[in-house]
Amino acid sequence: MATPHLRSGEMTNLIAPDEQFLMLPAHALFKDTHLEVIHMNLAEGKSLPSHQVNGPITIQCLSGDLQVGLEAGNKTMRADDLLYLAADLPHAMLAVTNASFLVTIVLLKTVAR
Amino acid sequence: MATPHLRSGEMTNLIAPDEQFLMLPAHALFKDTHLEVIHMNLAEGKSLPSHQVNGPITIQCLSGDLQVGLEAGNKTMRADDLLYLAADLPHAMLAVTNASFLVTIVLLKTVAR
């Protein structure tokens, strides 16, 4: 199902998004040439294997308990925690409880090529 | 006063930051080559004149009522509202009540030059 993206100058509420988005594991709020913000929902016990992206990112926990696995150890994030990860830093995720979080990614692909 | 920045892999809580930061009008949570996240506090009635940056940004209201002035009109943001602005879009800000918000900026200077 196609989901609408924010256009420049538009806003959304992070805690009370459209109900349809609560059913989606991931929904891009918008994707700009250099910036993408994704709202993710991970059910309790679900995980994302370790991966990395070529730009810096932030992960912001909106609700639930989210464990982020880094080479330096695990971080357990709760609502309103913001984590900064430099480009190319491997990270895995595990939803300790149902977790909702925002991932903000700087897109550098067009820069590097 | 110098304030510590998050290093890659470190996190902070957006709602309960160190008390010292609540006294500051602006505090960079971190500044990466391509990404900066700034926590701003604006007292009721205070404003920032219209300005623009050369990369895309998001503004996320953490608390209070924040009016963002765009050429297309004003947006009033409340807690957990996220606004996306494309690069070079002029925007002004007015704190309708004491307002705390996060500004996420993609830094493209090093790309363009």
Image: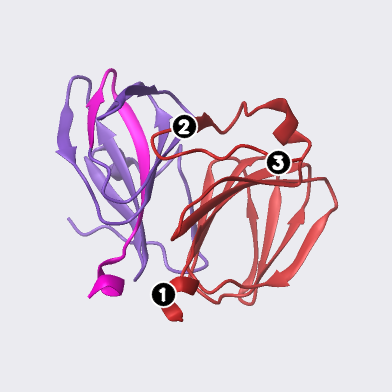
Chain colours: A purple, B red
Find the distance from the CA under tag 2 to the CA under tag 3: 18 Å
* Residue at (31% x, 73% y) in the render: A111
Q: Which comes before the other along the chain, label 2 or label 3?
A: 3
Q: Nearer the viewer, residue A9 or B1?
A: B1
Q: Nearer the viewer, mark 2 or mark 1?
A: 1
Q: Which comes before the other along the chain, label 2 or label 1?
A: 2
Residue range corresponding to the magenta coloring: A91-113
Mark 3 element type: loop
Q: Which comes before the other along the chain, label 1 or label 3?
A: 3
Mark 2 element type: strand
- Disc 2: host chain: B
Residue on which the image places disc 2: B11
Q: Amino acid at mark 3?
A: Ala
Find the distance from the CA under tag 2 to the CA under tag 1: 27 Å
Q: Residue furthest bottom?
A: B113
Which quarter of the image is occupied by the N terminus of chain A? bottom left
Residue on which the image places disc 3: B2
* Residue at (16% x, 36% y) in the render: A50
Q: Nearer the viewer, mark 1 or mark 3?
A: 3
* Residue at (27% x, 73% y) in the render: A110
Q: Nearer the viewer, residue B29 or B22?
A: B29
What percent of the width, then of the height, locates residue B103?
57, 53
Find the distance from the CA under tag 1 to the CA under tag 3: 28 Å
Rate crowding at label 3 as few (under 14), some (14 to 19) or many (20 or more) other CA atoms within 10 Å: few
- Disc 3: host chain: B
The reply, left or right, for residue A11 in relation to residue B4 is left
Mark 1 element type: helix
| Tag count | 3
Residue on which the image places disc 1: B111
Res B98 → quadrant: top right
**Residue A10 highlighted magenta (yes or no):** no
**Residue A98 highlighted magenta (yes or no):** yes
